[in-house]
Amino acid sequence: MVEDPFEYLEDLRNPDVVNWALSESRRCVERLKGVSDRVFGIALRYYSTPVLYSFSRNRAGLFFLRRDLAYSINLVRDGSTEVLVDSRNLGEDAAIHSYYIDREGRLFAYFYTLKGSDVGELVVAEVDTLSVVDRVGGSISDVVFLDGGRYYYVRFFREGRCPDGVEAPCERVFLRDGGRDEAVFGEGLPRSHFISLATSTDYSHALLRVSYGWARDTLYAGPLGSPSRWVKVYEGGFRSRLVDYVGGSYLAVLYDGEKFGKLVKVCGEVTELVPERGEYLQDAAVVGRYIVASYIRHASSYLAVFDLGGRPVREVTFDEPASVVRLSSHGSSGFVELRYFTKPYEVLEVLKSNGLSFKKITEHPRVMDAEVTEGFVDSYDGTKVHYFWVRRRAGSSKVVVYGYGGFSVALTPLFAPWIPVLIEMGYDVVVANLRGGSEYGEKWHEAGMRDRKVNVFHDYIAVARRFKSAGYKVVGLGRSNGGLLIGAVITMEPGLLDVAAIGYPVLDMLRFHKLYIGAAWIPEYGNPDDPRDREYLVKYSPYHNIRGEVRYPPTILYTGLYDDRVHPAHALKFYAKLRSYGNEACLRLETSSGHASSSPSVIAREVADVVAFIELSLSRVI
């Protein structure tokens, strides 16, 4: 057994634990206040910058989400825009996470949470009158409307058991009819298997994916209105997903072979349409008689258009590094939603004219005076690691290196308000594309999973060293799985980073599976109860590798008291252990934010405190 002197900090029902944590946080925030108040004004300006996203169409008009200092669902019809829902009317620090529309333009639904919780409420309302017709509480996703006001939804069971007795975490699909729920899919699926549900573009078929962690998928489908006829259509022991149902066949993406992704037709047997191209196939949609696919090339997106037989038609590239964050189709048209480091959003409508055209319908101008360059470094084993460098035109001697490296998440260009905050405060920002993501396909992801997780840390160290050796002050920043990354880096290479900022982190790799929904991450990290997995987990677990004789860089740990995804104890225990050995550390505990984020103003204040800690640490004031 490994001794854990701070295990008691996992008990958030103990008022002594909570009072201690809040007291430490108040002490931290008070020390930062002078600088933080100045940074907050800058942060609030960028966090109030509007971002438009999740565009959809039905017979009622054009729908989209808007985020500035609040969240709103908007509808454009007859040339005017109306706000259907404003998060400020839903409760304190409310955030709207998703919305869904029916085919007829009569009903819409939205899921929102308070103070960053993953648990919230689904509200169903009429488009014309905004009258609420139904409410469902819990962790809800993937709503698909049927006729007569009925709809399917996926419910995530976080604790206890699913209705069929399977231990949580688990998911099931329900049919909601007249306020009554009926479980219609997923019975007997084991723990930590998760379900995604969508409909074909023509609303004829349900498309389902059952995922075991981030390792393998099984595909199911069938007539939309007959869940008893939803059957397995493909299983390959690797990642895969359904795109659409076209001409009597299913269009799917399979990540087998070299695992970059290929497009296939599934109709009993599998027919290859578009083979692997040596670049990661990120997404695809059917628009009219064409397939629009987004690929990633060195962590930037481009589009490729094919006919329904898989023959290439054209490619669409962008003037600067960009991300296709969403592809959607509404039959004869669709949307491509883009993000840039320097520009909050750009939206293209895909139209059936001259074969297929891409028309820009809205965008936000650039918001910061910076240039984006790219580079590569060699990791410890010779692997080339790509990074983006967002550079101040006036130059800088300080750089924040951001990373994640896990769960197949690709760090492609994205407007994150904290980046222009740091640019304005005199920093450069580097975004590192580490193994564990999907920037170079699923093999790149697998190279950062389980017993190969240390590759992620070494990749990050190589990028940070490149800037350290050039004379920069280097700040490490990571959140969630990225918090694990920074925690591992400072325990592996204590002298590398000048400051560390660790947000909402996973840091105890021997008990993560016992805290909240941590068991869901076993496919990615390994199982601490398995002696073979435990052997490699304990070697890098940041919490267990803090040593008393070592000095670590000044470190701020920030998390949410009500984070119900990653238990706050990861941050509390790591902070307590650092402090017990006399290290410089600050604990910042938010009471209005969880893992699912919160209102932009709350996040702006949190970012201001983190930046203030970095500023003061580099100037040796703290």
Image (cartoon, rainbow, N blue to C red):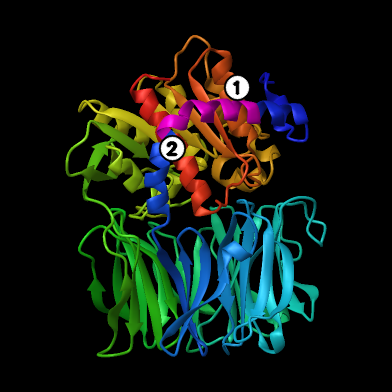
Q: Residue at x 62, y 63 (%)?
A: 112
Where does the N terminus fall, quadrant-wise? top right
Residue 132 position within the rendered picture, expressed as x and y whole percent measured from the top left? 70, 77
Most foreground residue, 285 or 217:
285
Q: Tell me if residue 489 is in the magenta stretch.
A: no
Q: Earlier in the sequence, mark 2 or mark 1?
A: 2
Tag 2 secondary structure: helix
Query: Main SS type for the magenta part?
Result: helix
Residue 460 falls left or right of residue 115: left
- Let me know if residue 280 appears in the view: yes
Q: Amino acid at mark 1?
A: Ala
Which residue lies under the disc numbered 1?
576
Residue 585 position within the rendered picture, expressed as x and y whole percent measured from the top left? 50, 23
Q: Residue at x 53, y 19 (%)?
A: 546
Please determine whether, in this image, residue 559 is positioned above or below residue 154: above
Most foreground residue, 16 or 44:
44
Residue 495 position within the rendered picture, expressed as x and y whole percent measured from the top left? 36, 19
Residues rendered magenta in the picture: 22-35
Q: Amino acid at mark 2?
A: Asp
Q: Badge 2 local density, few (<14 within 10 Å), some, or many (20+)?
A: some
Residue 546 falls left or right of residue 367: right
Tag 1 secondary structure: helix
Which residue lies under the disc numbered 2?
37
